[in-house]
Image (cartoon, rainbow, N blue to C red):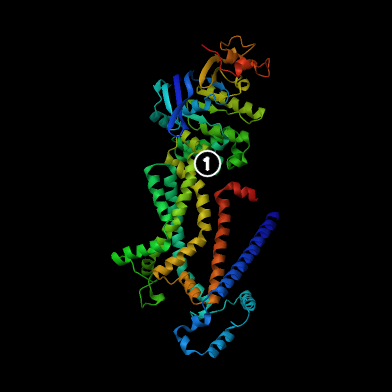
Amino acid sequence: MALDMRLTAWLASRILRLMLVLLCVAAVSFGLMMLSPIDPVDAYLGPQMAQVSPEQRALIAEQWGFDAPASVQFSHWLRHVLSGELGWSHIYNQPVSEVIQQRFQRSLALLFSAWLLALLLGMILGIAAGSKEGSWLDRFISGYAYVTASTPTFWLAMLALLLFSVTLGWTPTCCAGPAGVLRQEVDPLTRLHHLILPIATLALLGMATITLHTRAKMVAFMRSETALHAFAQGASRFDIAWRHGIRHASLPAITLAFASLGELFGGSLLIEQVFAYPGLGQATVAAGLRSDVPLLLAIALFTALFVSIGNLIADGLYHLADPRIAQGQR
Amino acid sequence: MLHIDRLILQLPHYPHWWRQEWTTCIDALSLHIAPGEVHAVVGASGAGKSLLAAAIMGLLPSAARLEGALHFQATPLTPARQRQLRGRQLALIPQSLSALDPLARSRQQVRWAAQRAGLGRPAAQQRADELLAHYQLSHAATHYPHELSGGMARRVLIAMAQVSNAQLVIADEPSVGLDPTQRDRVLAKLKAIAREGKAVMLITHDLRHALPVADRVTVMYQGRGIETATAQAFRGQGEQLTSPYARSLWQALPDNAFSTQPSVLCQEPAFA
C-alpha cells in the first residue's frame, strides 16, 4: 500500500518533470526558429520565388499565420499539440506525425543496432583491457579507444564510405534500399546491406567512451580488496573479470549507454546525412534548412522524449545492477 | 608445516622521481607454525604483519623484493606453487570486510570460493550451503554484504576460507570491530579449525584476546620478530619473556599493571 503510494508519487513527479522539459525544449526550439534567417515562405517557394509577387507572398504568410506575433504563433501551436495535432509538414506535404513515424522506423533499426553493438562490444573490450592494466592487450584497446573517441563522426563516415563503398565496392553508397525500388519491396537482407556501414560507423564512436569508462572501472576494481581476496582464493584474472568484473563494470556502462542516447541521436544525424539514409536525422536537417517549423518542433519534442525515457530506463536498471541502490530507494 | 627462515621483504619507493629506494618491511623474520596450532602474530600497526600474510600467499605487489626461505610442508613456496596452492592449501581470511563483493549474495561468494578451490558447481553449491549452515548463516545466504552485520560478514569470510581443506589458514585481524560476544565466537571458530589438525596463523594487534586461543605468540616490531613464546609465558609480570619489548607489551595490558614504560615501548627495543 505504502509502496504503491510512493511509486505513484515518484511516477507523477517524473512525468511532471518530463512535461516541463518538453515545454522548455519546445520553447527554445521555437525561439531558435524565429531567430533563424531562413524565411519559411521563401523556403517553401524555392526556385519559384521569383514568379511570386509580394502581395501573394503576404497572402501566403497571412494564410499560414506568419504575420502574427511569435507568442501567438507558439500558443497556437501548443494548443494544437495538446489536442494531439502535431501539424502539417510543408516540405513532405504529409502530416508531421506520419513523417516522424515513417522516418523513425528506419532510424530505429540504425540507432538500436548501433547502440546495442556499442554497449556490448564496449563492455567486452573495456573489461578485457581493464582486467590486466598495462598489458599489451590493454595498451592496444585503450589506444584504439582514444583514437576513435577523438575522431569526428562525419569524417569517419566519409572515410568508411570511400574505402568500403567506393574503392572496394562492398557496400552501397547511399539510401535505405536500391534506387527505383519501393520501400515495401526491399527485402530484409538488402536493407541490412544498406545499414551495415552506417551502423558500424555509429557504433564505433559510441563504443569508444563505453570502452574507456568500463576499463577505468575495471582497473579500479582490480586494485580493490575484493579482487585481492579473489586472488587469495586462487581465482585467475579471467575468473575475476567474469564473476565480479561484469557486475561492477555494467553500472557505468549502462549509465553511459542510456545517458548518451542524445549523443547517439546527434551522431545519427551526421551519419544519415553522409550516407543519405532517409531517417529521422535527415528529416531534421531538411526541416531546419527549409524552415519547416512544425516538423522541427515535433522532432525536437520526440527526441527529448526519447532521451528522457532512456534516462528513466537507466535509473530503473541501476536497481538490478546494484542492490545497494535498490535498498536506498526502498 | 610453515617454515619461514630469515625472511626479508623490501618494497621500492621513490623519494624523488629519479631515485628509487628500498624500504625494508620485514627484516630477517623467522617463524615456524606446526599443524594443530594457533600461532598469534602480534604487533603494532606497521609492524609488517599483513605484508607477512601477503608474502606467504604470494599476493605482494610485483615490485616487491623477497629474500630468505619460505617453506610449506617441507617444500619451498615458489610463486608458481603459491598460485597453485592459493585457495586450496593456503587460505586467507582478509582483514577488511570490503573484501566481500558488494554486488554478490553471501551464498554466491562462498560458492565461488568453493569453485575456485576446484569443486564442480553442484558440489561447490552443496559445500557453500553446508558451511553457511555451520556458521549459522543460512538465513543470510541471499543477503548482500551491506545487509550483513560485522560479525556475520566476518563469518562469511571465514566460511569462504573453509571451502577447501586448506592446511594453513591465515586470519588477518579477524576480531577487529566486533563486540565481545562476536569476537569470542570468531576466535573460537579459529581454534576449532586448529583442532582439526590445521595450522592457523592469527594476525592481530590485540594480544589480550589472542592469548586464550593461541598456542604460541610471535611479537613483531618494525618488521622484525622480537620474540616467539608460548601463550603460557604471558603471565604474572612476564618473567618468562626474554625481550623487554614483549614484556612491556604484556605489562601494558589493562588487566595487568597497565604500566607503560615509554622508554621501551615507544623507542627502538633493545634486543640481541
Of A19 and B140, nearer the camera is A19
Q: Which residue is most to the left?
A: A168
Q: Please count the marks in the image.
A: 1
Residue B270 place in picture, x, y as percent: 55, 13
Image quadrant containing the N terminus of chain A: bottom right
Asked if residue A147 is positioned above or below residue A16 in the image, the reply reads above
Of B14 and A89, nearer the camera is B14
Q: At 57% from the left edge and 78% from the top edge, which residue is drawn? A: A87
Amino acid type indicated by mark 1? Gln
Residue identifier under label 1: B108
Q: Which residue is most to the top?
A: B239
Q: At 36% from the left edge and 69% from the top edge, which residue is drawn? A: A190
Residue B190 place in picture, x, y as percent: 56, 25
| Chain ID at mark 1 | B
Q: Is residue B1 among what the camera can see? A: no
Asked if residue B14 is positioned above or below residue A70 in the image, the reply reads above
Of A29 and A327, nearer the camera is A29
Query: How busy is the neighbourhood of tag 1: few (under 14 within 10 Å), some, or many (20 plus)?
Result: many
Q: In terms of secondary structure, where does tag 1 sit?
A: helix
Q: Is residue B142 among what the camera can see? A: yes
Residue A328 place in picture, x, y as percent: 64, 48
Asked if residue A144 is positioned above or below residue A264 in the image, the reply reads above
Residue A182 place in picture, x, y as percent: 39, 77
Asked if residue B55 is positioned above or below residue B107 in the image, the reply reads above
Q: At 55% from the left edge and 76% from the top edge, which residue is drawn? A: A293
